[in-house]
Each structure stands twice: as structure tokens, then as C-alpha cells.
Amino acid sequence: MNEPSHTRTRILDTAQDLVQRIGANAMSYQHISEAVGIRKASIHHHFPKKEDLLEALIQRYSGQFFTWLDGIARAKVAAPVKLQRYIALFEATLREGKHDRACPIGMLGAELASLGTASAALVQLFRKKNEGFLTGVLQQGLKDGQFNFSGDHRATAALIFALLEGEMLVARGAAGVKDFSKVAKQMLRLLQR
Amino acid sequence: MNEPSHTRTRILDTAQDLVQRIGANAMSYQHISEAVGIRKASIHHHFPKKEDLLEALIQRYSGQFFTWLDGIARAKVAAPVKLQRYIALFEATLREGKHDRACPIGMLGAELASLGTASAALVQLFRKKNEGFLTGVLQQGLKDGQFNFSGDHRATAALIFALLEGEMLVARGAAGVKDFSKVAKQMLRLLQR
DNA sequence: GTCTATAGCGCGATAGAC
DNA sequence: GTCTATCGCGCTATAGAC
């Protein structure tokens, strides 16, 4: 099991940070070069095309995220607790670093038209997996009587995902982690009572 | 009362369409030039800097939108109907043209870090006005017993706005107007029962 | 108000030495 | 694996003729 080279990791870290703050279109090899302390040509050695870099970035983030999702799904806890843990994943992403960082996949979702087909497919997969996870949690909660609402589970799952991603993307600057948490809490409240 | 020149309007129309589909960073004077059938330099005559163009675009869209908001707010109808009309505003934006078009201000919100201070302020204003409108509708609905939920009105207003903007931004490609409407309907349901 | 022409820069990407 | 050097392109923006 080979560790990925340190430089490769630092490039991905920097690229992800840039995507979260300014988006993939505004991010450049020059930016990364300066932040990592390496020349542009060296970045091309690790990621020949920008599309390769974006694809790797999405793969890495999605992989981590899916692992966390699985952990939450398997846990023997009540559905509302699972939902709170899910929300905490987003809050952790939002909190890293001092700047306003959105979900990297959410940013790329907004820029979907500029992505290659491989990256675009991964972005769509991310959404599907998240909505699948949420659908499961909602079903469990309804069965156990912890949630109480009518209507389609899938639409409700899509609602939750869009809400959390949207709050990160659109509520930049003015809001912060605190406002994000407030909104997320209110969503939980609407599902329970 | 002078009509704005036809060319200026066509430039703004094209720019808005591009922002909705690919974002402000990916949009260029070259794109607009080809779509409008005019040279790049002529666009600079109407909008010297790109920032000027974006600012005008936001002003125009916000102005129309705020007028519609006022109309809905003043109407003598029940709160859920107002909310439905509000949702219809977003659906109309989504439906224009055949492509996946998000809310232009939502796109710019995601790209906030790339905007000038004037444009950024207008984007924030758009969110505040929307949340203010929604807060009013929610209060009316609670007073009249048409809505039934506990918790902060403002957080709920932010929730609705983030949800609608997020659904437009993140659910590109796979979803469409139909899925958008489903999710919006489900939100209404959660507020009422 | 639109045009041609061009400046000046940053971008992604490649070749080839070390 | 990192470097220097460079290519070719598209971008925003400006000058000046018509």
C-alpha cells in the first residue's frame, strides 16, 4: 500500500482549498504553484491536464465522504442522531480554515457546464449517494416514529441535500458556521415535531 | 424616460444567460460578441469593465425580482399561496430557454470571491430582501394558522431561500423543472400540516 | 455607436536539461 | 521529480478611424 507522494497531496490540498473558495474556473496552476512552492511544470507532472487534477480532487473528497456516510449509516443510533452527524460533516468542511469554504463538490456542481464528462459524472454520483443515504435515514426515522412528515422520501432527501449545499454556497460572507447550524437545526425541527 | 438602447439590452440578456449556465468567471466578452453579433470593442463601449456589466446585470435582475416580490407581498391572499407564487418565480427563471439555467444571483453568490465590492454587495442585498420577504410571509401564515411550525422565523426564511437556490445550482443535469417543483412542494408540506 | 488593430497579461500545456 | 524556457491561445481593455 503506497502512500501517495507528499507533493501530490499538497497539490490536491491546495487545489481543493481554491475550489472551495473561488471555484474551479478561477483556480489556476499558477495559484497552486505559489501556494505549494513548486513550479507550474511540476504540477503538470503529477496532473497532466487540469481535468485530471479536478477528477482526482473529487475522487479523494468523495471517497472520504462516502466512508463517513457508511459509518453513520451503519451506526446503531436513532435517525435524528444520524442526521445530526451528517450535518456535522458539512459543518466540519465549512469550518476548516478561516475563510468561507463551501463544499468542493457543491462548487463544482454550480460549475458543472465547465467540467469534463468524467468529473461531471463524479459530481452527479456524489449527489446520488448523498440522497440515497438521506432516504435511508428518513425511512428509518419514520418507521421508528422519530420523524413525522408526509410526502415522498426521495423528494425530502433531495430537499435536505439542496438545502445544506445551497446554504454553504449562497450564504457566503454574511452568514457563517453559526447561521449554517441554525438553519440545519430548523430543518431537523421541521422533520420531527 | 429613455428606453435603454436595444444593443445594451441584448448584451445584458446574453450575459445573463451565460452567467446562469456557466457562471461569471467562464463568461467572456468573446462569447457575448458572437451571440449578439457585435465586436468585443463595442461591448466595452456599453460596459467599459466586466465588473460594470455584472453590476448592471444584477441591478436589472434584482429590480425585476423585487418588483415581483412586492406584488406578491401586497396581494390579499393566504400565506401558502404567496409562497407558491414565490416558488413560481424561481420556476420561471429555471424554465426560460432549453438549457439548465440557475438563478443568476445564485451563481454569482457561489462566485462571490471573484466579484467586485459593488456586485458583491448587490448579491448580499438580494439574499436579505428575499429572506425579509419570506419572514413576512411566514409570520402571516403562522398568525392565520395556515402554517404550523416552531422555531425561528428568520432561520426558516434562510432555509427556504437556501433550499431553492441550492436546488437550482446543485441539481443540474439530472434534475429539471419537474424535480425542482417536487422538492419545493415538499417544503410547503413540511411547513403546513 | 461600431469598427480594426493591438497591447499586455495569465492561462494550460509541452520540451528537454538536470 | 523538479527545473527553465517557451509556445499558443483567450482574456480584458484601450486607441483611434469611420
Image: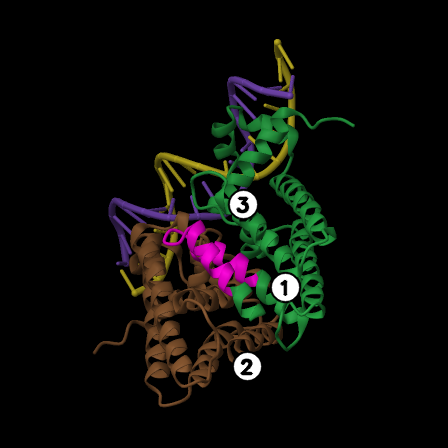
Chain colours: A brown, B green, C purple, D yellow
Q: Give the residue type that dot 3 points to.
A: Thr
Protein chain holding label 3: B
Report which quarter residue A133 is drawn in: bottom left
Q: Secondary structure at mark 2?
A: loop
Say above or below: A68 vs B57.
Answer: below
Q: Is residue B102 visible?
A: yes
Q: Secondary structure at mark 3?
A: helix
Task: Depth check: give the residue in front, B80 or A52.
Answer: B80
Q: Is residue B26 visible?
A: no
Residue D17, percent from left and from top = 62, 12
Mark 3 nearby-residue class (10 Å; few <14, some 14–19, many ≥20): some
Mark 1 nearby-residue class (10 Å; few <14, some 14–19, many ≥20): few
Instruction: Judge from the rendering whether residue A88 lies leftward or rightward of residue A183; answer left or right.
Output: left
Report which quarter residue A86 is drawn in: bottom left
Task: Depth check: give the residue in front, A104 or B135.
Answer: B135
Question: Which disc is residue A173 wearing?
Answer: 1
Q: Name the residue tied to disc 3.
A: B93
Mark 3 vs mark 1, CA separation in Å: 25 Å
Residue mark closest to the camera, 3 vs 1: 3
Mark 1 vs mark 2, CA separation in Å: 32 Å
Residue mark closest to the camera, 1 vs 2: 2
Q: Is the C terminus of chain A in the top left, top right, bottom left or bottom right quadrant?
A: bottom right
Q: Name the residue at 58% across, 68% down.
A: B192
Residue A128, percent from left and from top = 34, 64
Q: Which residues are magenta?
A: B162-186
Do the CB atoms of the residues marked 3 and 1 lie less than 8 Å apart?
Answer: no
Marks 3 and 1 on same chain: no
Residue A61, percent from left and from top = 37, 69
Marks 1 and 2 on same chain: yes
In the rendered image, the residue lying farthest to the left is A1
Q: Name the residue tied to disc 2.
A: A193
Magenta: main secondary structure equals: helix
